[in-house]
Amino acid sequence: MSNLTIALLSFPVLLVLIFGRMPIGLAMLVCGFFGNWLVLGRFTPILAQMKTLTFTTFSSYSLSIIPLFLLMGQFAAKGGMSQALFRAANGWLGHRKGGVAMAAIGACAGFGAICGSSIATAATMGKVALPELKRFGYDGGLATGALAAGGTLGILIPPSVILVIYAILTEQNIAKLFLAAVVPGVLAMLGYMLTIAIYVRLKPEASGLRDKAPMAERLQLTLDVWPVLLVFFLVVFGIYFGWFTPTEGAAIGAAGTGLIALLNGGLKDGALGEAIRETAVSTGMIFLIILGAGVYNAFLALSQLPQEAAAWVVGQGFSPWTVLTVILLTYLAFGCVMDSLSMILLTVPIFFPIVSGLDFGLTPDEFAIWFGILILIVVEVGLITPPVGLNLFVINSMAKDTPMIRTFKGAAPFVASDIVRTTILTVFPAITLFLVRWLY
């Protein structure tokens, strides 16, 4: 059996292990370990590789940004910032048709700007917004679908843990990737709000109305969210202007949100220990996936699969846009069965070399940034597509009276919005690259 055949057969084996409920990081580790053994014919090189790979991976200074952003999200959740964001957005939008759901989307975008995790954004905002949506008579499918979709903004609007991983894998500038994600993130928020507006006009019974808040109350609620805006601008613009490195920016963001949570009384009664513990658990899970992906990708590189795949695509004479379309569709399919981090770690080392050699009329750096944002968007769609749309399960677990099938149906219009947005950003790369070109 050739090395290439072994590599190709490893994919269905990996999927079988994942469907068998083995943790994804461990499944990739097992496939990579035994794949290396089949290619090399002995265990000694693999054990040596495990020793060096584990050390070099976990001692990487760049990876320290991940627990810091996760800790920032924990502090933000416990400091009441999610409630302040939702109250402010609800004050301005809640009286409109579908306005409470739109406010939830806006609050998710704001919280995503200080969190960086989709699941954390969905879970936190679900606790805050779901009771209000129920109180004003919103259909269960629309309420859960909107919150699941809004949660995906956590990995799109910077800072984003997934973008950090992509930057490390492709050796790109984290600040430029954060900057490039701003416009697509705003478009995603506006697209979801437009989807809600269309939905409630087609189905008026799906939402209720609340009274219009006085202007003085709106202004006061807006002033209450200044800590969130301060932390966001300090971290993102601090990194962009070179005041500090991305890791230092993450540390400052975590310290800032921690101080705000402390002053708000959100770190009482063991909440600080709980925040640190949950950060440690999430970091451990992510690092296991990173290690498993490292071993598996080393096996794929040894088998020459990425190089052979790139040479085959070039030899077929496919147009660059055809190749890109197939890759994006592949991500949509993977999103139905895998989580976002695993997809990025598993596929970028294979797909990036393939598309990097194609001509899209962009410089190599511009292409890498644009491709990263496109991947992030289609990975985000996977979080709200069945059967393994993690955000759907997170939100539905909070809505005990809403069947899972209604949550799936409620998320469908938002998936359609994502597909439209992905198409626009694919056809017009300048939308994504506008800020990067202007400011760099």
Image (cartoon, grey):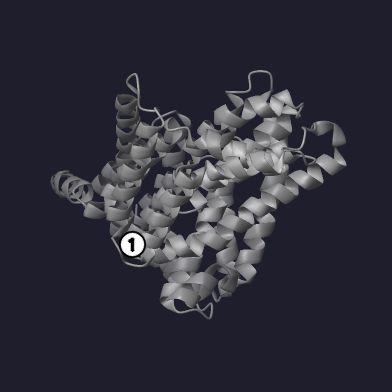
Residue occupying image coordinates x 70% and y 37% = 100
Viewed as shown, does residue 30 lie left or right of 181? left
Residue occupying image coordinates x 28% and y 54% = 247
Amino acid type, callout 1: Gln
Q: Secondary structure at mark 1?
A: loop
Residue 246 image-quadrant placement: bottom left
Residue 85: give x, y in percent of width and height: 56, 40
Residue occupying image coordinates x 21% and y 46% = 58
Residue 267 image-quadrant placement: top left
Residue 222: give x, y in percent of width and height: 58, 45
Q: Nearer the viewer, residue 243 or 98?
A: 243
Reading the image, the residue beneath label 1 is: 304
- Is residue 265 at all visible to an observer of this figure? yes
Residue 352: give x, y in percent of width and height: 43, 64
Residue 255 image-quadrant placement: top left
Determine the residue located farthest toward the front in the rendered image.
216
Residue occupying image coordinates x 53% and y 50% = 379
- Is residue 150 at all visible to an observer of this figure? no
Mark 1 surroundings within 10 Å by alpha-carbon count, few (fewer than 14), some (14 through 19), many (20 or more): some
Q: Nearer the viewer, residue 277 or 331?
A: 277
Viewed as shown, does residue 21 lie left or right of 108? left
Residue 413: give x, y in percent of width and height: 73, 44
Viewed as shown, does residue 426 lie left or right of 202? left
Quadrant position of the C terminus in the picture: bottom left
